Image (tube, grey):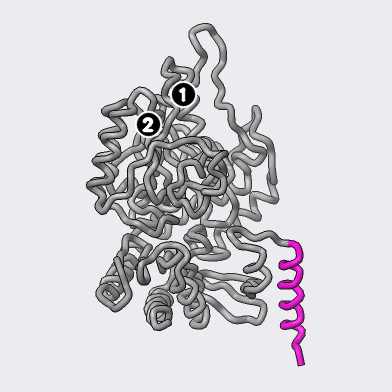
């Protein structure tokens, strides 16, 4: 006999299949593959309709960096909702957003002093592209309209951000809509990549609006980790040709690499920095693009007196609820020593990943901060090992969604040490099962 819970679950799945259009999922897969039905969450745990718990090993697409329903974030959200739910940003400021901006620049790389708030990571990158492009257009350098982006780069799904992507599996269908990017050819080492970027930057110096990079780790491209010297050299060549270094810290920011920003691994300040995901610890959609005073001053009135406003703004930019949550995230970092806790957990992850290197079928075991990854077989998108790994992890009560055949873990920063060990052990077991076929 079907229980009430099972009947409710089946009804929800049927309703979802009938009306929901999920991301990156074909209709056939949507109709055939049974989804998890998650009804609640707490800390690092997701709970399905039947009460079964799953460790959220990827922080719900890297966003829930402080776990789920952190009591301080819930309180910050509800307290703000009781005072001010929403107000447009045109000609208006409010306490939460003004105070957040002041606090954010204090923890940002030195020199980033201006903050434009937006909705999500893709939008934050879109804003950075527009800022860089518009700056050069209105400062007598109108030929500067091209960007350098890396192979295996991923910067979001909106058209400008998608144009920067080097993960061709995602956006090739939209090719005719995307703008052309200067991109180094695939290489076998980071030295070769940087040497090619240096050459391209010098070749295209008069038309280059910016160099866009995910500092320290390329996320959706397969958790590709960079030595710190990569970003230092990109900063140097950007200075040499007088263009902007744009850091996409949507994934790497807020401690994911072990430091507050991926840029901090290299002790580099970019000209523009994009943040989201951990910015609100996944509680509300919100993002920010930070800029230097030099860039902001390029938007002051022209010599003829005409204004130069940034021509971008969404309904929910600077949303009071998101701003209140983002402020509380920063307070939690300060008061609960989150970065110190990350370092302890990062050591456990690194030691465990090092032990996986050399296993049959495991390639490039690697770790940095709160990220650990391996390639199964040849890696890449479209292989069979990734789906097998996903199902093997689910069977062990772990939510670990691979990037093609790159299996990775990316847990909340405050996960308990016992829970982290459980995650690491299950990660290894799921790899073994996936490779066994």
Name which residue lies at 68% across and 59% down: 21
Instruction: For label 1, count other residues whose C-alpha is less than 10 Å away and answer few (under 14), some (14-19) or many (20+).
Output: many
Decide which of 283, 248 is in the foreground and name it. 248
Tell me where residue 31 appears, x and y as whole percent: 68, 70
Instruction: For label 2, count other residues whose C-alpha is less than 10 Å away and answer few (under 14), some (14-19) or many (20+).
Output: many
Tell me where residue 324 appears, x and y as whole percent: 58, 48
Relative placement, left or right, of 225 versus 336 is left
Residue placed under numbered mark 1 in the picture: 135
Decide which of 225, 296 is in the foreground and name it. 225
Residue placed under numbered mark 2 in the picture: 244
Tally of numbered tags: 2
- The mark found on residue 16 in the picture is none
**Residue 422: in sight, yes or no?**
no
Name which residue lies at 41% across and 18% down: 141
Decide which of 131, 322 is in the foreground and name it. 131
Name which residue lies at 62% across and 62% down: 26
Say above or below: 381 vs 419.
above
Choose the circle earlier in sequence order: 1 or 2.
Answer: 1
Helix, strand or loop at label 2? It is strand
- The answer to the question of whether label 1 and label 2 lie on touching residues, with beta carbons closer than 8 A, is yes
Decide which of 160, 112 is in the foreground and name it. 160
Whether residue 2 appears in magenta in the rendering, the answer is yes
Relative placement, left or right, of 407 versus 367 is right
Residue at the outermost top position: 304
Magenta region: which residues? 1-19
Tell me where residue 315 appears, x and y as whole percent: 67, 38
Helix, strand or loop at label 1? It is helix
| Quadrant of the snapshot with the C terminus | bottom left
Q: CA distance from mark 1 to mark 2?
A: 10 Å
Q: Which quadrant would residue 201 be assigned to in this image?
A: top left
Tell me where residue 243 appears, x and y as whole percent: 35, 28
Relative placement, left or right, of 18 versus 228 is right
């Amino acid at each position: 006999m079907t229980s009430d819970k099972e009947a409710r679950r089946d009804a929800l799945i049927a309703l979802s299949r009938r009306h929901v259009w999920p991301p990156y999922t074909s209709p056939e897969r949507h109709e055939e593959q049974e989804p998890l039905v998650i009804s609640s969450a707490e800390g690092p745990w997701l709970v399905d309709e039947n009460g079964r718990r799953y460790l959220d090993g990827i922080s719900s697409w890297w966003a829930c960096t402080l776990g789920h329903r952190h009591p301080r974030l819930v309180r910050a959200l509800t307290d703000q909702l009781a005072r001010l739910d929403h107000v447009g940003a045109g000609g208006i400021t409010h306490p939460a957003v003004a105070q957040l901006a002041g606090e954010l620049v204090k923890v940002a790389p030195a020199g980033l002093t201006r903050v434009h708030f937006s909705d999500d990571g893709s939008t934050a990158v879109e804003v950075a592209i527009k800022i860089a492009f518009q700056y050069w257009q209105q400062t007598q350098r109108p030929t500067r309209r091209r960007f350098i982006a890396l192979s295996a780069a991923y910067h979001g799904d909106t058209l400008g951000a998608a144009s920067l992507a080097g993960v061709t599996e995602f956006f090739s269908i939209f090719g005719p809509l995307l703008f052309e990017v200067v991109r180094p050819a695939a290489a076998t080492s980071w030295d070769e990549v940087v040497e090619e970027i240096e050459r391209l930057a010098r070749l295209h110096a008069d038309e280059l609006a910016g160099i866009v990079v995910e500092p320290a780790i390329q996320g959706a491209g397969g958790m590709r980790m960079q030595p710190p010297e990569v970003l230092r050299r990109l900063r140097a060549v950007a200075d040499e040709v007088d263009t902007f270094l744009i850091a996409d810290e949507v994934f790497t920011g807020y401690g994911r690499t072990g430091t507050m920003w991926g840029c901090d691994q290299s002790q580099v300040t970019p000209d523009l920095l994009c943040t989201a995901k951990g910015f609100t610890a996944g509680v509300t959609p919100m993002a920010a693009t930070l800029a230097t005073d030099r860039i902001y001053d390029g938007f002051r009135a022209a010599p003829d007196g005409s204004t130069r406003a940034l021509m971008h703004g969404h309904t929910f930019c600077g949303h009071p609820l998101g701003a209140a949550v983002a402020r509380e995230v920063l307070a939690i970092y300060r008061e609960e020593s989150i970065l110190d806790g990350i370092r302890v957990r990062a050591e456990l992850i690194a030691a465990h990943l090092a032990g996986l290197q050399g296993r049959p079928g495991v390639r490039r075991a690697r770790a940095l901060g709160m990220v650990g990854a391996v390639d199964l077989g040849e890696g890449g998108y479209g292989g069979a090992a990734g789906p097998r790994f996903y199902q093997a992890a689910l069977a062990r009560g772990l939510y670990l969604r691979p990037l093609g055949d790159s299996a990775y873990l990316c847990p909340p920063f405050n996960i308990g040490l016992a829970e982290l060990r459980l995650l690491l052990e299950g990660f290894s077991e799921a790899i073994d099962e996936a490779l066994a076929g």
